[in-house]
Amino acid sequence: MSPAVFPSRSVASRLTTLFWRHPRLLLGLLLAPPLLWLGLVYLGALAALLLQSFYSIDDFSGLIVPELTLKTYAQLFRPSNFDVITRTLLMALSVTVASGVIAFPVAYYAARFARGRWKAAFYLGVMLPLWSSYLVKVYAWKLILAKEGIVTWAATATHTDWLLDAALSLPGIGGSSLSTSYIGTFLVFCYVWLPYMILPMQAALERVPTSMLEASADLGATAGQTFRTVTLPLALPGIIAGSIFTFSLTLGDYIIPQIIGNSASFIGMAVYQLQGTAGNVPLAAAFAVVPILIMLVYLTLARRAGAFDAL
Amino acid sequence: MRSEASWPLRIAALAGLLFLHLPILLIFLYAFTTDERTFTFPPPGLTTQWFAVAWNRADIWPPLMLSLQVALFSTLLALVLGTLVAAAMSGARFFGRDQLSLLIVLPIALPGVITGIALRSAIPMLHLNFGWQTIVLGHATFCIVIVYNNAVARFRRLSGGILEASADLGANAFQTFRYILLPNLGTALLAGGMLAFALSFDEVIVTTFTAGTGAASKTLPIWMLDELIRPRQRPVTNVVAMVVFATTFLPILLAYYLTREGSETAGSGK
């Protein structure tokens, strides 16, 4: 009688048994690298940013004083800095509303009427601009809005240049040409963030059950009434979800107002210039905390409206 | 009840789509203009000389190569990290799961300028020098979520049964990964990788914060940004813009076709 011979077990199969007996161990091994990366690199960086915003800068030496103070935050309320914040907020609000208005017909048509090949065309038609190069899109608008560019040409050709001139002479938002006015900045923001608005809107509209629309019609509602009392309330979370993107992206952008606009400062530009040429990292950090706070409030309100289920 | 769309709705929807696409076409047109100082429309004349000029400009090649290198490394890092998170998130319920999913989305949900300045202020604290590696550090961070979104959707569709069947038939964990999991995840990972590559190749906001100052860390988008602020030979910028557009357009289209059969389609969220 010789003893039973078991095949020698390889490291791989011994590890397999170990993972089978202790599933938590496998989970830990899977999670460790991404957690280390995001936890250390990203959360660490955000914590560093938050900490810096409580530092201040010495007025005489220009050096950072690493003592906790609210002095830097108080500087945000100086008129010149506070203007930057209100300007950015107003821009983000108007861009969000305008994108919503332009996006709705596209999303509504794609969700309710487009079928088969058209549906795919609409999807690609929104997705490709969403992913295609941001800088190329901004550059395209520099060509369009330039004084000698296509908009001026089209206005002259259709004899509507008086309309363009009237828009440009509006106090506050006008300028010498579209590419150096708030109107230009606003148009480019709308263009660049529009796909972010369409996609969640379309997803929400697709989830509105057809049976409810039929029930509404059976009960005698006109198309307009059905739209106002059934479709719109049910699609609202999707609209709010889209607005999160347009709002947040406008709050933080600093490239667009730098290239197209009247060189008035926005939050993103303030952050970039303060940390770079001015070397005032604490104030830059405090400026960066402003959009974080605004977005936290916005997200809390959006969560109450059920927007996260629509993402 | 399937009524036809009304004409105003059709026109508004089509106008919206045209609004999204026509501006890009102008980039192509202006690459052929003979006017190198302004953006006169219509172009005074057409020429193809700018393609040759761009080809021979020595300042374009190093940024192009750097951008490809950064996008490649960021994509590879994001592929590994994103797949790991997706595997962990799909397999188990654990403490902090919701917080983790928030943490993954955060780098892309917060405005880029915040991710940028956060990394900018943290990197010197870690005693790292700014260079192409720090650009990769930033890019990989926000590319993780792209890979994760694609992979986790595929994991959800994959039934746990085939993994158990593989184990029952005597495969060890690594064989199951190699012969069962990887072939099933393949197209989703490829799609996620493509999107991550496109995103990294064209990223400019975080890059301006994490790049060093020298020419050695000038990516193609940063080169383009410089040309936008201080233009010279404008049509050359258009030629480069066409290259950037094509380099991001093709992977995105491929990602769409790789995943369109499934219930999840790549690219529905950025």
Image (cartoon, grey):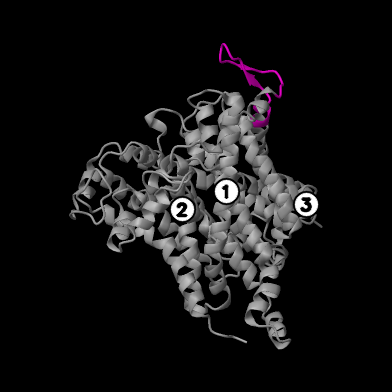
- The quarter holding residue A112 reads bottom right
Mark 1 element type: helix
Tell me the subunit letter for badge 2. Answer: A
Q: Residues within 10 Å of mark 2 (few under 14, many from 20)?
A: some
Picture quarter containing residue A48?
Answer: top right
Alpha carbon of mark 2 to alpha carbon of mark 3: how far?
53 Å
Question: On the image, numbered disc 1 is attached to which residue?
Answer: A92
Chain that bears disc 3: A
Highlighted range, magenta: A49-70
Q: Earlier in the sequence, mark 1 or mark 3?
A: 3
**Quarter occupied by the N terminus of chain A:** bottom right
User: Relative to B199, is A156 above or below?
Assistant: below
Mark 3 belongs to which amino acid?
A: Pro
* Label 1 Cα crowd, 10 Å radius (few <14 / some 14-19 / many 20+): many
- Circle number at residue A37: none
Task: Let me know if marks 1 and 2 both belong to one chain.
Answer: yes
Amino acid type, residue under disc 1 in the picture: Ala
- Write down the residue under mark 3: A23
Q: Amino acid at mark 2?
A: Leu
Residue at image position (52%, 54%) is A193
In this rendering, is residue A206 above or below A127?
below
Q: Say which residue label 2 marks.
A: A187
